[in-house]
């Protein structure tokens, strides 16, 4: 794990998280009036270079993953693609968690829920000095494939927390999809954005796209969420898939 850091601390679920029944009802209502979810979807090809964003030396996977999502959302919204370097991610990691570069003992990772709260209130600053905030996050049922596919299609990306098995690094380095290998132990928590589905689940981690099998997601997902941000919508309020911001916000506010 020397070249790849983890760092996600599982978030406690609270009464503010919607339950699975409510979420599936929203998806059912939304997808009867909006375009039906296709068999394959995603806009990951809008980003040519994702970047490691300090996750090879710091347990900042949550902050690095959020930055990757913001890059994608700004590209989807036909805006200048947000740029991030290790510098911005390390600074943001310090702001959110109290990490001190001069004290390695403070590199302890992050709960996604802590990051979401900070993003709503303060945002994250990119290389060009632009501040990116989110409006809302909604907890999904961990390991539920239907929730994952629908949220990724509707919102461009989903937030995934996994417990990384020891075989995942070898599969990553060999360019193989993450799959379940019997008898493996887990190394710790890791935050990865889901950005597409094309027969496999596509996530971004450690600077590039990684494929994941359905069984792997079902077994190792410890938490998941979707995020609503205005940045994924173009000037007319639509996503590339035809979803309108007012409709999504109205439906989410009813939950």
Image: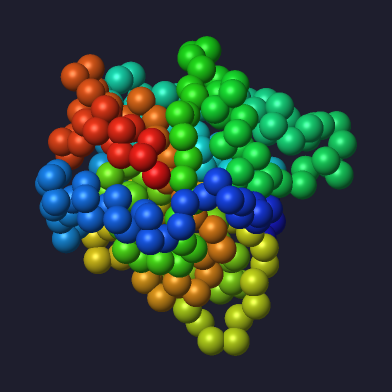
In x, y percent, where is residue 226? 42, 45
Residue located 15% across and 36% down the image: 242
Q: Quadrant of the N terminus?
A: bottom right
Q: Quadrant of the C terminus?
A: top left
Image-quadrant location for residue 125: top right
In the image, is residue 170 above or below residue 56? below
| Side of 178 where 188 appears, left or right | right
Extreme-top residue of the structure? 129
In x, y percent, where is residue 20? 42, 60
Tell me, what colour scheme is on the image?
Answer: rainbow
| Side of 50 where 96 appears, left or right | right
Image-quadrant location for residue 217: bottom left
In the image, is residue 4 above or below residue 238? below
In x, y percent, where is residue 244? 21, 31
In the image, is residue 135 above or below residue 55? above
Total count of labels: 0
| Side of 205 where 107 appears, left or right | right
Image-quadrant location for residue 101: top right
Extreme-front residue of the structure? 254
Using the image as rendered, state which of residue 26 and residue 124 is in the foreground.
26
User: Do we see residue 56 in this rendering?
Assistant: no
Residue located 67% across and 63% down the image: 188
Residue located 17% across and 39% down the image: 241
Using the image as rendered, state which of residue 126 and residue 57 is in the foreground.
126
Residue located 60% across and 34% down the image: 117
User: Do we see residue 242 in this rendering?
Assistant: yes
């Amino acid at each position: 794990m020397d070249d790849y850091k983890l760092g996600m601390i599982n978030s406690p679920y609270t009464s503010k998280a919607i339950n699975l029944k409510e979420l599936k009802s929203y998806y059912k209502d939304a997808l009867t009036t909006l375009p039906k979810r296709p068999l394959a979807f995603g806009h990951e090809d809008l980003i040519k270079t994702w970047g490691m964003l300090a996750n090879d030396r710091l347990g900042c996977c949550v902050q690095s993953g959020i930055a990757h999502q913001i890059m994608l959302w700004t590209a989807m919204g036909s805006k200048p693609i947000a740029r991030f370097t290790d510098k911005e991610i390390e600074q943001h990691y310090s702001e959110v968690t109290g990490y001190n570069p001069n004290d390695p003992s403070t590199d302890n990772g992050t709960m996604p829920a802590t990051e979401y709260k900070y993003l709503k209130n303060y945002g994250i600053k990119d290389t060009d000095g632009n501040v990116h905030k989110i409006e809302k996050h909604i907890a999904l049922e961990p390991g539920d494939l239907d929730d994952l596919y629908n949220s990724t299609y509707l919102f461009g990306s989903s937030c995934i927390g996994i417990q990384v098995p020891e075989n995942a690094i070898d599969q990553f380095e060999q360019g193989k999809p993450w799959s379940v290998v019997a008898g493996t132990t887990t190394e710790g928590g890791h935050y990865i954005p889901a950005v597409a589905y094309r027969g496999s689940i596509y996530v971004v981690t450690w600077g590039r796209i990684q494929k994941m099998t359905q069984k792997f997601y079902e077994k190792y997902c410890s938490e998941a969420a979707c995020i609503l941000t205005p940045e994924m919508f173009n000037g007319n309020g639509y996503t590339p898939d035809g979803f309108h911001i007012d409709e999504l916000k109205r439906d989410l506010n009813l939950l």
